Image (tube, rainbow, N blue to C red):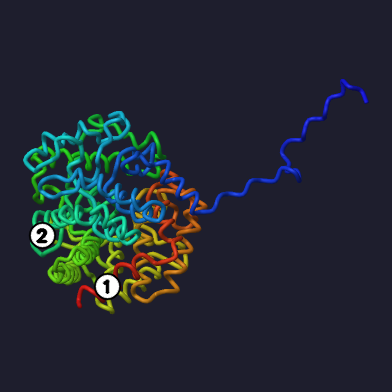
Amino acid sequence: MDSTAQRAPRPTGRTVAYDPPVPAPPLHVRAAAVLEAGWTGTSTVPSRGLYPHQWSWDSAFIAIGLRHVSPLRAQTELETLLAAQWADGRIPHIVFNPSVPLDAYFPSPDFWRSSTAGRAAGAPRTVQTSGIVQPPVHALAAWLVHLADPGLSRARGFLARAYPRLAAWHRYLLHRRDLGGGGLVSVVHPWEQGMDNSPCWDRPLSRVTPAPARSFRRADLDHGSPEDRPTDLDYGRYVRLATDYRDRGYLDGPGGFAVEDPAFNALLIASEYALARIARELGAAAPARQERAERLTDALVERLWEPSAGTFLCRDVCAGELIPERGVSGLIPLLLPNLPRDLAATLVRTVCGPHFGLGGTTRLVPSYDLLGDAFDPHRYWRGPAWFNTNWLLERGLRLHGERGRADALRRGILHTAGTSDFAEYVDPHTGQACGATGFGWTAALTLDLLHDRPAWDKDCVTAIKGEVRG
């Protein structure tokens, strides 16, 4: 053989028998890797590029999933957030990481000016935060994190340290935010409810004069398609509301925007039940919290239930009327154990009917009415399906005996999370990824659904209904 002969190059573009494709890691390994990539040492960012700080309700959902990977990290996640609590009890919606450049996210710490503008409300001096809040999932998250490793939790005094802060958080909401006078909590900014550009906000937001476009720069558009994000007009109104709230020292009042939202209040009720369990674990009396949760459920039904719509609606406190838009927020009360049976049955019909299409035209529940004039399958909360709301609805369906539908929704969530690379949100018809991928709460709630024991109905509701009453 000619020693100078060259081996023929391997053909490209084909698979050979001795070089098989590497199989994708299991879903739980991929989900855990997302949380590992977002871990800062004390908390988890929702997305390294798009959301590089700690977000309040993101951290609660992340802790719920993280408890299956590391109960200690899950406890630390919540402890880091609670350490930024204001003296008036509010838990801010963002805790800023000082190592992140100011221009990486807007509104940045120099916009909120928490340590100065929030001084009268007791903003912390040693950490920069926003001045608004997000849905109160935290007590529920704390209870579920405790259950993941009760021995570790007790040894570290996790619940004993968290309980006073969580109780103060609920007091703030119940005492400072009952702006409608009917016993429910109001949000004073769309970012507080978490579903920023939902069509449910269009009517009350229309009264808000937007801040000039030149007065702010949107960092979110550096990381996402403009077609998937809120519009510049939306952002102008968000900035105006936040500026006005900051300039009055973060003092609570109706201002230009005040809405009673069914999801926000339902999550408060769920967390009241969880606080009752935490109190019992710590050896304290719990009946008052149980009774408060039941009173809040009654107020929710009285003020926000609309029989003709088959769902709960938002109430515009300033205008004194319900907002006639069906959003996923109106379905979230399905997770409440004491919801009247006929209302729960109606909500199930609405979830599976033409307005939300679960099990028919959609595999995941969209964020807004499929038949609504404002429906958009890609634009943030105006139609796309989100994993946190679907996780809540899966728990609600299971709680109210809809096991088959809950199982189907669980399969849909897990399949779509995997095929979309843990997207922030997806097209409800096709499952196409929108927003960021490798998103924190998507990965965390995937882990929770992959876990053997259903976290909601077994660990939380059964214990509350069976033990607290006794």
User: Regarding mark 2 in the picture, which secondary structure is present there?
Assistant: loop
Residue 314 image point, x, y percent? 22, 61
Front one among 152 and 84? 152
Question: Farthest residue in the left direction?
Answer: 120
Residue sitting at x 30%, y 73%: 462
Residue sitting at x 8%, y 43%: 121
Residue sitting at x 9%, y 38%: 119
Picture quadrant of residue 12: top right
Q: Which residue is mark 1?
A: 337
The amino acid pointed to by label 2 is: Gly
Question: Farthest residue in the top direction?
Answer: 4
The amino acid pointed to by label 1 is: Pro
Q: Which of the marked residues, 1 or 2, is nearer the chain's N terminus?
A: 2
Q: Which mark is residue 180?
A: 2
352 relative to 188, above or below: below
Picture quadrant of residue 176: bottom left
Residue 197 visible in the snapshot: no
Front one among 75 and 395? 75
User: Regarding mark 1 in the picture, which secondary structure is present there?
Assistant: loop
Report how far apart the C-alphas of labels 1 and 2 lie in the structure. 25 Å
